[in-house]
């Protein structure tokens, strides 16, 4: 745990709803589950179209895998919804538990991926992504939200990620 994290006393997670979730119209349903089941607060959100450059940065660890072309095709197929979720310590893990296993076929009943995910032609369409640690969340939030938007909507996080504004 970083000093920044403990000084804020809060956890912040990046949560992405992928094109299949947006197309299915379940964005609000899933966000409601996060605010009720996880007791997280949505501090900022935005819908956007992923670019190939942004996708490669986000999935840098998978770019050289043979299945990356399928991920790219899927993630560029429609709008993505990004949200910054704030909560008490343990929020990141609670979000990941609510989501379930990355393979929807292995996700526990009652989880988001079990309920809404599917496998199409061998490709996992698992509805959402969530940060797996506070450090990853900070990097992902900087990737998907502008400094200006953070200063406007989550000023204490903007100060942590970008420094004081003079």
Image (cartoon, helix red, strand yellow):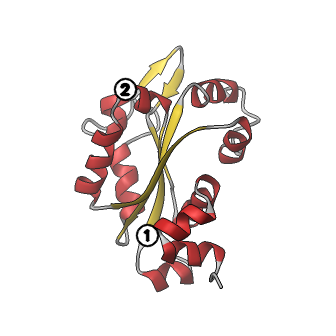
Q: Position of residue 41 (x, y in %)?
A: 33, 62
Residue linked to disc 1: 11
- Within-10-Å neighbours for mark 2: few <14, some 14–19, many 20+: few
Rendering quarter of residue 114: top left
Cα separation between marks 1 and 2: 29 Å
Asked if residue 83 shows in the view, the reply is no
Q: In x, y percent, where is residue 102?
A: 47, 38
Q: Residue at x 55, y 81 (%)?
A: 4
The structure residue drawn at horizontal position 42% and vertical position 26%, both measured from the top left corner, is 23
For the view shown, which residue lies furthest in the top direction?
121
From the viewer's perspective, tell me whether residue 96 is left or right of residue 115: right
Q: Which residue has dot 2 on it?
A: 24
Q: Residue 115 placed where, x, y %?
A: 30, 31
Q: Does 100 appear above or below 7?
A: above
Camera-near label (1 vs 2) is 2
> Which of these two is toward me, 149 or 94?
149
């Amino acid at each position: 745990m970083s000093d920044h994290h403990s000084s804020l006393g809060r956890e912040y997670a990046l949560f992405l709803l992928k094109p299949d979730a947006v197309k299915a119209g379940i964005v609000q349903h899933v966000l409601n589950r996060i605010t009720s089941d996880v007791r997280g607060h949505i501090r900022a959100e935005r819908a956007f179209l992923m670019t190939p450059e942004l996708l490669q940065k986000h999935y840098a660890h998978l770019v050289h895998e043979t299945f990356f072309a399928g991920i790219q095709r899927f993630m560029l197929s429609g709008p993505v919804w990004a949200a910054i979720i704030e909560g008490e310590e343990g929020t990141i893990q609670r979000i990941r538990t609510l989501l379930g296993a990355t393979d929807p076929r292995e996700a526990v009943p009652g989880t988001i991926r079990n309920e809404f995910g599917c496998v199409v032609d061998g490709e996992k369409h698992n509805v959402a992504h969530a940060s797996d640690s506070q450090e990853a969340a900070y990097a992902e939030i900087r990737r998907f939200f502008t400094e200006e938007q953070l200063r406007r909507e989550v000023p204490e996080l903007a100060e942590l990620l970008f420094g004081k504004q003079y």
